[in-house]
Every structure is written in structure tokens, then in C-alpha cells.
Image (spheres, rainbow, N blue to C red):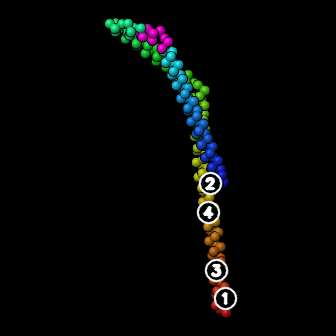
């Protein structure tokens, strides 16, 4: 009974490690996706137009602002696509499952630990009661023997 909680605690620790790894994978996936999105935005016609207009048109501020808003719209669209790619990715799915497993393993370990504590407490109480009864018996025997000796 004493080894089971330790085993379940180790299992919980392992599951938590797996969850952390999958979380790391999701983070790196998000970073790469963001880099891709940034590259895509930089390649778009809107971005190139905005770049040219901001360089050339110092007087034509309105045209540059119009191109800037178009660029923002494009960036928002591509970022949305990137977010969809991350949430639907394999890494995200493994993160969900590993974190669920870690939570379950932790629950099990906590349950097992409290069960074993109850069991060992009950065993200790039984042992103490048995020792007390034995001590009572020996004391009674000694008292009876002393009484006999005194009466002789």
C-alpha cells in the first residue's frame, strides 16, 4: 500500500512534464506562425505600396494613410489565418490531451496518498490497542503473582 501513492505521484509528475513539453511545442508553433505571417504581410502589395508611398510622398500624407489602413486590414486577415493554423495544429491537440492526463494523474495521486494515510493511521491505532492489551495482561499477571507471594 505504501508504494502505490509514490508511483502515482511519479506518474503525475511525468504527465505534468509531458504537458509542459507540449505547451512548449505550441509556443514554438505560434512563434513560427507569427514569423510566417509577418513575412507574408511584408510581401503583400499593400505593404510594398505603403513602403513606397511613405518614402516618396512626403506631401501626399493622405495617400500613405490610405495605404497604411489597407496594410493594417491585410495584417489582421493574415494574423487570423495564422491563429487558426495554431489552434488547429497537432501540437495544440497534444497539449490538450497531455494537460488533461496530467490533471487526472495528479488527482489520482492525491486520492491515493490520502487513502494510504488513512490505512496506515488505522493500522497504527490497531497496533497501539494490541500493545495496550498485552501490557494490561502482563501487569495483571505480575500483580496476581505478587499477591500470591504476599499471601504465603
Q: Which residue is mark 3?
A: 140
Q: What is the C-alpha distance between the residues marked 3 and 1?
A: 12 Å
The local crowd at label 3, few if under 14, some if 14 to 19, many if 20 or more residues have their Cα within 10 Å, is: few
Q: Which residue is mark 2?
A: 116
The local crowd at label 1, few if under 14, some if 14 to 19, many if 20 or more residues have their Cα within 10 Å, is: few
Q: Which residue is mark 1?
A: 148
Q: What is the C-alpha distance between the residues marked 2 and 4?
A: 12 Å
Residue closest to the far bottom: 152
The local crowd at label 2, few if under 14, some if 14 to 19, many if 20 or more residues have their Cα within 10 Å, is: some
- The answer to whether mark 4 and mark 3 are in CB contact below 8 A is no
Q: Which residues are magenta?
A: 42-51
The local crowd at label 4, few if under 14, some if 14 to 19, many if 20 or more residues have their Cα within 10 Å, is: few
The secondary element bearing badge 1 is classed as helix
Q: Which residue is mark 4?
A: 124
- Decide which of 8, 24 is in the foreground and name it: 24
Location of residue 1 (image quadrant): bottom right
Q: What is the C-alpha distance between the residues marked 4 and 3?
A: 24 Å
The secondary element bearing badge 4 is classed as helix
Amino acid at each position: 500500500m505504501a508504494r502505490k501513492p509514490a508511483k502515482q505521484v511519479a506518474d503525475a509528475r511525468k504527465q505534468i512534464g509531458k504537458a509542459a513539453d507540449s505547451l512548449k511545442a505550441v509556443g514554438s508553433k505560434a512563434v513560427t506562425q507569427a514569423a510566417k505571417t509577418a513575412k507574408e504581410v511584408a510581401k503583400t502589395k499593400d505593404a510594398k505600396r505603403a513602403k513606397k508611398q511613405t518614402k516618396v510622398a512626403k506631401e501626399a500624407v493622405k495617400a500613405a494613410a490610405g495605404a497604411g489602413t489597407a496594410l493594417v486590414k491585410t495584417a489582421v486577415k493574415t494574423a487570423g489565418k495564422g491563429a487558426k493554423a495554431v489552434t488547429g495544429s497537432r501540437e495544440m491537440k497534444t497539449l490538450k490531451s497531455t494537460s488533461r492526463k496530467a490533471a487526472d494523474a495528479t488527482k489520482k495521486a492525491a486520492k491515493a496518498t490520502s487513502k494510504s494515510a488513512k490505512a496506515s493511521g488505522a493500522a497504527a491505532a490497531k497496533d497501539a490497542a494490541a500493545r495496550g492489551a498485552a501490557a494490561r495482561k502482563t501487569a495483571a499477571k505480575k500483580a496476581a503473582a505478587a499477591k500470591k507471594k504476599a499471601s504465603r
